[in-house]
């Protein structure tokens, strides 16, 4: 039977969970081999005090997940950032529930703002598609310097800058309240083209990584395994 969770709008009463959340974000990023913009416990606490975050618990009040809202370009853009699910509760649909809740909170607090996200995961792309997000180019995202500065702690920052912030390992997705397809349409499109998206992401990541591979690894087993990974379906 699917486990039930309580997903609440966070407030200052949950500030004691800030360190746990930050630790889990960092641990998860390392396990995936991807980077995230690091946030301090004080930053997470601030989001809670402002009512710009959601937090999930089991029915027994065990912490299970978290996500928060960030605004850029004077509120023109909103990002749902820092999505994390505790290891014990992954692969059970909780991430999708949290994304839906934070999306609804974003639409309530910033009804005119464009909501965007960057992800390296096909699972997150699927969830975003079910909410009405569409894949876009980086040029359609906020150009706020503060946002891109947050990428400095990402392991892929060198790739991002080498591409003049026009491309990186992440896929950009956007929900524009003034110009968007209905969630059912974006969901159907993702379902029909999921294999194509997956292959595209692997090819893109391989091409972005290629210039950074050491020349001496050419023809080595490491290079061959990378080729196999990025071009397999």
Image (cartoon, helix red, strand yellow):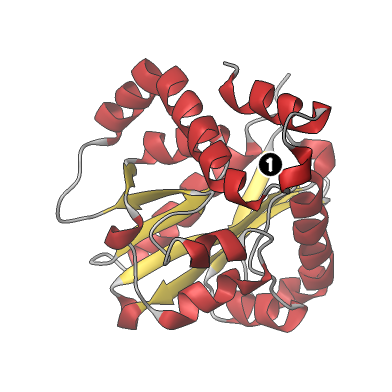
Tell me if 168 is positioned left or right of 178 in this view.
Answer: right
Residue 19 in which image quadrant: bottom right
Quadrant showing the N terminus: top right
> Is residue 109 something that shows in the picture?
no
Residue 66 in which image quadrant: bottom right
Tell me if 69 is positioned left or right of 228 in this view.
Answer: left
Q: Is residue 226 above or below residue 164?
A: above
Tell me if 167 is positioned left or right of 152 in this view.
Answer: left
Q: Nearer the viewer, residue 232 or 88?
A: 232
Give the residue displayed 82% in from the left and 74% down from the top: 16
- Measured as percent of width and height from the top left, residue 214 is found at 73, 49
Give the residue displayed 28% in from the left and 59% down from the top: 140
Q: Nearer the viewer, residue 153 or 27?
A: 153
Q: Nearer the viewer, residue 232 or 111?
A: 232
- Measured as percent of width and height from the top left, residue 213 is found at 69, 47
Q: Is residue 53 above or below residue 104?
A: below
Name the residue carrying label 1. Answer: 5
Helix, strand or loop at disc 1? strand
Quadrant showing the C terminus: top right
- Measured as percent of width and height from the top left, residue 135 is found at 34, 42
> Is residue 224 something that shows in the picture?
yes
Give the residue displayed 43% in from the left and 28% down from the top: 197
| Residue located farthest toward the left when viewing the structure as drawn | 178
Give the residue displayed 83% in from the left and 46% down from the top: 60
């Amino acid at each position: 039977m699917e486990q039930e969770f309580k997903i609440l709008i966070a407030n200052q009463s949950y500030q004691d969970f800030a360190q746990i959340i930050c630790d889990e974000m960092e641990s998860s990023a390392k396990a995936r081999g991807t980077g995230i913009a690091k946030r301090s416990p004080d930053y997470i606490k601030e989001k809670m005090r402002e009512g710009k975050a959601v937090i999930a618990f089991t029915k027994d009040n065990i912490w299970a997940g978290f996500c928060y809202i960030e605004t850029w370009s004077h509120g023109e853009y909103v990002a749902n950032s820092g999505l994390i699910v505790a290891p014990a509760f992954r692969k059970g649909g909780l991430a999708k529930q949290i994304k839906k809740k934070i999306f609804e909170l974003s639409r309530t607090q910033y009804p005119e703002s464009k909501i965007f996200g960057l992800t390296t995961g096909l699972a997150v792309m699927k969830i975003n598609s079910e909410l009405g997000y569409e894949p876009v180019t980086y040029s359609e995202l906020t150009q706020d310097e503060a946002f891109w500065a947050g990428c400095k702690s990402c392991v892929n920052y060198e790739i991002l800058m080498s591409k003049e912030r026009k491309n990186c390992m992440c896929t950009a997705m956007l929900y524009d309240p003034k110009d968007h397809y209905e969630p059912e349409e974006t969901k159907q499109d993702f379902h029909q083209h999921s294999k194509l998206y997956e292959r595209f992401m692997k090819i893109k990541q391989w091409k972005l990584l290629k210039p950074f591979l050491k020349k001496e690894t050419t023809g080595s087993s490491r290079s061959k395994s990378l080729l196999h990974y990025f071009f397999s379906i």
